[in-house]
Amino acid sequence: MEKKRLDDHEAATISSPRSLDRFGFLVRPDASTSDGLVKSRSAQFERIREDRRVRKWRKMIGVGGSDWKHYLRKKPHVVKRRIRKGIPDCLRGLVWQLISGSRDLLLMNPGVYEQLVIYETSASELDIIRDISRTFPSHVFFQQRHGPGQRSLYNVLKAYSVFDRDVGYVQGMGFLAGLLLLYMSEEDAFWLLVALLKGAVHAPMEGLYLTGLPLVQQYLFQFEHLVQEHLPKLGEHFAQEMINPSMYASQWFITVFSYSFPFHLALRIWDVFLFEGVKIVFKVGLALLKYCHDDLVKLPFEKLIHALKNFPQDAMNPDILLPLAYSIKISRRLEELRQEYEKKNGKITQSREFTEEQTVQRL
Amino acid sequence: MARSDEEYDYLFKVVLIGDSGVGKSNLLSRFTRNEFCLESKSTIGVEFATRTLEVEGRTVKAQIWDTAGQERYRAITSAYYRGALGALLVYDVTKPTTFDNVGRWLKELRDHADANIVTTLIGNKTDLKHLRAVASEDARTYAEKEGLSFVETSALESINVDKAFHTILAEIYRIISKKSLSSSADAAAAATLKEGKTITVAAPHPNAKDGKPCCSS
Ligand SMILES: Nc1nc2c(ncn2[C@@H]2O[C@H](COP(=O)(O)OP(=O)(O)OP(=O)(O)O)[C@@H](O)[C@H]2O)c(=O)[nH]1
Ligand SMILES: [Mg+2]
């Protein structure tokens, strides 16, 4: 009887074993995956190349990351170049913690995460629960209701919402936490989130989530100007069709491309993002528009919006898109535009001053 | 004869608002693509979809903006109320707090939308009968008091979804066709609807002069 029911179930839903891509996302039968690209090349050649890369990386970071700081100080350009080529997947979790500064935060704050998860309560608990099953719903790790994936996602988000009650929980943060949890433990993911939002290495990201979403507004302002300057014809077309970046780019900034972009591309962007900062989000955004420029300038309003949310497969190839992004120079203009925005709108105030010592003191 | 998607008599911009998780995105996907997704992602910012249909014998293209429901997102989503002719204000019949918040959403509309925006109250998820916590009568009474039309829907079971959209589009149509009869200035405004971009019927919104990028389209 029991057996029979199982069979029925299988026949109905998993007649062929559920197929997952190499990152654990469910593959729809009709979807052509990026893996096709890799498979068509000589698999053996790929493996040898990958092994060589991993060996180089292991040497660079040392056992458990012991040589990392030394290497980084000695050869920052080598590190930057290697990261831009992509961090080997098996080392990604560790390297992300090293380059984001989260490893240091973790070591300086033993027991803090546990305290936040177990003993504190958060005003955002219901909001977080409501979104848990709506975060990476097509990934095996997060699919099972109340499974380990959903539980750890909940814990990290709840802990953060207690850690910084001004930010609390905002839709979108789950995608950051979810992506991190695929590469590290709950506690590590939590501290990486802290490092990003509080600005351990780069400018703090918390303004993306504070009341009024001030940093989203600033980034959209900067992005709009960069589009007009780097792609004037497209910029003009956008203006004519009354397209503004809040219609398509808010998600890019709020979730650092983790919301709707192919996962293999999101990971490559995150490698660079954690090392070089938010500049890469602007660059990738511009690169996408540049790559699709000739199609986009022809489209009327509605088709344009659709195209800006559904870029073609070939534009999503990291080995094409990222070199294009690296070639776009924006640092100086980005800074000027930030100042211009601040002059008009005032400086974005942070939720709290943050120093590493304070983290400990406060808790 | 079926007309192509590009031909229409009117273009109406409508916004979907209401608390997070009440089912706005699924109502939209049900209406525009006849799809429902139990595992949909929460909306970040705004999404957009259209559908062209017959309303009172006219071909109307509904241009629908779906917004993120979480309060903090209003900082970006409220810009999209501008120029909207209709608002579908959704709550979840199984979650009383989402109904309690309807008043706050109406205030949002008063603060950011055009004064004569047509608003329909929607109680979604009627398929969850055993979990219902907001009685139809209470909601209907409230809607009448506030001058809103009211429909209960299930995006999951595809109940009343077309009706909800139809109701608001028909109401907008009636107001606009009445206006274009009564004043030539408004007639000109209504006529521009056909162009597919200018869809504000009322006078320019006061916010229009602050130089911020315009989000209506
Ligand atoms: N049973 C039932 N579930 C529904 C219905 N409509 C939506 N849902 C579910 O409710 C959850 C939230 O739906 P969404 O459409 O994402 O909600 P939303 O209002 O767009 O939420 P935000 O994007 O966060 O503002 C999802 O899990 C849906 O599957 C319905 O009619 N019946
Ligand atoms: Mg939604």
Image (spheres, rainbow, N blue to C red):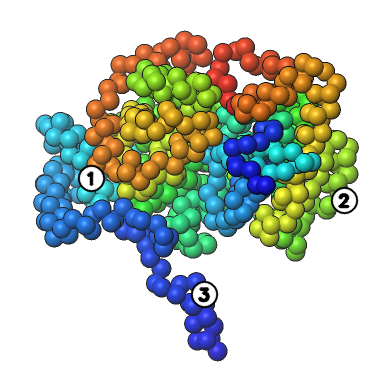
Please, what is the three-letter code of the amino acid marked with disc 1? Ile
The residue most toward the front is: B1
Residue sitting at x 50%, y 71%: A13
The residue most toward the top is: A343
Q: Is residue A258 left or right of residue A168?
A: left
Helix, strand or loop under label 2? helix
> Where is residue A344 drawn, in percent x and y?
50, 11
Q: Which mark is residue B137?
A: 2
Helix, strand or loop under label 1? loop
Residue sitting at x 66%, y 36%: B8
Helix, strand or loop under label 3? helix
Q: Residues within 10 Å of mark 3 (few under 14, many from 20)?
A: few
Q: Ligand 1: does it lie within 8 Å of the C-beta at label 3?
A: no
Question: Which chain is mark 1 on?
Answer: A
Label 1 sits on residue? A87
Please, what is the three-letter code of the amino acid marked with disc 2? Glu
Q: Are marks 1 and 2 in contact (CB under 8 Å)?
A: no
Q: Residues within 10 Å of mark 1 (few under 14, many from 20)?
A: many
